Amino acid sequence: MLLGTNGSGKSTLLRLLAGLLQPQSGEIQVKQPIGFVFQNPDHQLVMPTVGADVAFGLVAERLPPQAVRQRVEEALLAVNLLALQRRPIYALSGGQKQRVAIAGAIARHCEVLLLDEPTALLDPDSQLDLVAQVQKLVKSRGLTALWVTHRLGELDYCDGAFLLDKGCVVDQGDPARLKQRIMQVEDLSGAAPT
């Protein structure tokens, strides 16, 4: 997970890794393909139904229709949305929309999943469900997930964390240790822990 205050460079780093921004200097190398999940899923879901949206990302691969159907079904099964394949996007909850975005990445066989505060717009139950879903996908599919968050509780579900400040990594390592460090700083500043 990537942590840091607003403006620390978390989202910029994800956008650089995804190729949505170009670095001003240096070079970035990341396994391809990459799946990117925005904070607001309405900014990336473009088709009218769940299945059509997951299939949309496969257009460039020019697969036969049967292969597209198989990948869509496998991806929706992986995020527990197979039964909603024909459901209109507008009829989904926020958490379901985030899982559709993740299914689109899985259907493209992404190896790296970048998530930019995907729980920010979700209720507490949906937040935990999405975190657990991504954790399960990382373990079962061998995905690498890089997750931006402001929610310290989400650190309990990750393998490692990076703390950013002004575009630089200022600490990294054990999530529990970083969580404790951030909570101590917030206690000293009088801010309520997030």
Image (cartoon, rainbow, N blue to C red):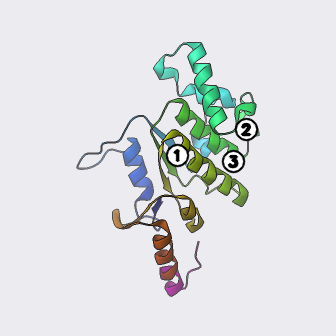
Where does the C terminus fall, quadrant-wise?
bottom right
Q: Earlier in the sequence, mark 3 or mark 1?
A: 3
Q: Is residue 20 visible?
A: no
Residue 186: in magenta span:
yes
Asked where in the image residue 125 lies, by quadrant, the reply is bottom right
At x 50%, y 86%, the residue is: 188
Q: Is residue 3 visible?
A: yes
Q: Nearer the viewer, mark 2 or mark 1?
A: 1
Query: Which residue is denoted by mark 1 in the rendering?
Result: 138
Which residues are drawn in magenta? 185-194
Query: Which residue is denoted by mark 2 in the rendering?
Result: 90
Residue 3: in magenta span:
no
Q: Is residue 119 left or right of residue 147?
A: right
- Disc sitting over residue 1 in the figure: none
Q: Calculate the distance from the C-alpha at mark 3 to the C-alpha at mark 2.
A: 10 Å
Q: Which residue lies most toward the left here? A: 26
